[in-house]
Amino acid sequence: MKKYFISLLFLSFVACNPTPKKTAIDNSKVQEKPNIVIIYLDDLGYGDLSSYGATALQTPNIDALANEGIKFTNGYASSATCTPSRYALLTGMYPWRNKDAKILPGTAPLLISTTQQTLPKMLKKQGYQTAIVGKWHLGLGTGIVNWNDKVTPGPNEVGFDESYILAATQDRVPTVYIKDGNVVGLDKNDPIEVNYKENFEGEPTAISNPEMLTMKWHHGHNSSIVNGIPRIGYMKGGEDAKWTDTDMADHFLAKAQNYIKTHKEKPFFLYYAMQQPHVPRTPHPRFVGKSRMGPRGDVILEADWAIGEFMKTLKEEGILENTLIVFSSDNGPVLNDGYYDGAVEKAGNHDPKGGLRGGKYSIFEAGTRVPFITYWKGKIQPKVSDAIVCQMDLLASIADLVGAKETSTDSKNLRNTFLGNADKGREHLIIEATGKTALRSGDWLYIPTYSGKNFRKAVGIEVGNFPYEQLYNLKEDKAQQKNLAETDTQKLVEMKQTFINLRGENHRKGVKEVVFE
């Protein structure tokens, strides 16, 4: 009787709890928090993608992100140059708050304080694995670096569990990869020496040995020669560790792919900082001539291909639906940035600025307004957004997404805007170029009165000063051809006061005051 009762009880349990049906979803891989990937290009302009209006270049893989995600038409880097923008992206802070946030040499000390908040630090506290693959350019060490020992502090000391980087830029020494602070492939019997002020005795340079060059320098790049390419700065030794320029895109792609394959069981943050289309533009032979626009066009197509391969890997590993991807660029475009590579001559009808004014280094729109895309398959619905957003805002927005709160920085929580659930972006944004700042507010852009060599570079004029304020309605005048400062004085006063309020004491640096009666 007892056995009979137990059997009936077992059958009742089975009847009430049938065996679950098998589904295509592997529940063991389902996470509460999404993986987060930031794909960051270098010097890619607002008009360099077919999804942003380019016709001479076709970028189908990046276009897929734009067409199936949110394409922002008013997406900004914080600065018109690389180091400040990367600083803002990772720290959520305006770069003009840090006097050292400017284009750094390869020997510069770490720009980010090891005690300040960063995006990877915040995510680590929420249980994320964190990694950077690609360009760093935020300084390493304390100012005196022994490249033959572990270089620290660096990415690993500001929140990244793993790092595989180039120290600065592809055109600067040291021309080696660094993994978690250690130079990859270094022969200790051939130590590396780096100097940005003077050459090492007997070492060839672009000036002393032009016959060794495979790429001709135009300006600035006339120091040490590596792989036939003249660089900024002097380097000696480390022959076995030197990278092969034409393999760099493949190399970083393989590292990024391997990272997600080996870290997919737990939520991860990957900062995939690609080197294209920064100089020297060295496409793999597979891409040489593919764009018919010279090396600059070729490396943009190479980057698009690499992103396509990366996306395939996310899909093959079964984690695409649980991965938020942010795509952008550190600043606007530049054609001739130090080498004769045909970028100017072969551009044809292609406008990397996308109808904007300026470019890299410029306070005008093309310096900081860049392609900006958010993509999350199945979670973000396709749309085009005109909201003003900045890379600096990713810190607070992603914090909110993963259950944290970030209010200690300049970052604004635009989570709903980035996910497509709201149309409102930033009300005000300070943009920066070569140490000078301007204000984007609604449809308007205000540029204070500046003068001097740096400002001439920032606004793209060769000689003289720019001794008057500028005010543009960007909705009506995207190309910034009509300065309304003299005709719309009420708006000028309003924008000027907002700018001063946001900049505080700092607004006076480099600004010539104008008295309004």
Image: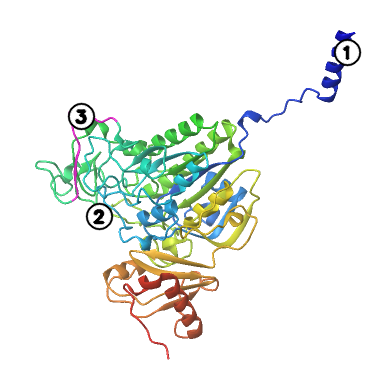
Percent x, y for residue 397? 54, 53
Q: Residue at x 49, y 52 (%)?
A: 395
Identify which residue, 331 or 99, lies in the foreground.
99
Of all residues, the one furthest to the right in this rendering is: 1
Residue 190 within the magenta-colored segment of the rendering: yes
Identify which residue, 514 or 381, lies in the foreground.
514
Identify which residue, 138 or 14, lies in the foreground.
14
Of all residues, the one furthest to the bottom in this rendering is: 517
Percent x, y for residue 156? 37, 40
The answer to whether residue 512 of the structure is visible from this angle is yes
Q: Earlier in the sequence, mark 3 or mark 2?
A: 3
For the residues labelled 1 and 3, say whether their Cβ atoms are less than 8 Å apart: no
What amino acid type is highlighted by mark number 2? His
**Which span is picked out in magenta?**
185-196
- Which of label 1 and label 2 is nearer to you? 1
Percent x, y for residue 365? 45, 66
Q: How is the image coloured?
A: rainbow
Q: Residue at x 47, y 81 (%)?
A: 492
- Residue assigned mark 1: 5
Identify which residue, 103 or 45, lies in the foreground.
103
The answer to whether residue 60 of the structure is visible from this angle is no
Q: Which mark is residue 188?
A: 3
Of all residues, the one furthest to the left in this rendering is: 201
- Residue assigned mark 2: 218
Most prominent secondary structure in the magenta stretch? loop
* Local secondary structure at mark 2: loop
Q: Quadrant of the N terminus?
A: top right
What amino acid type is highlighted by mark number 3? Lys
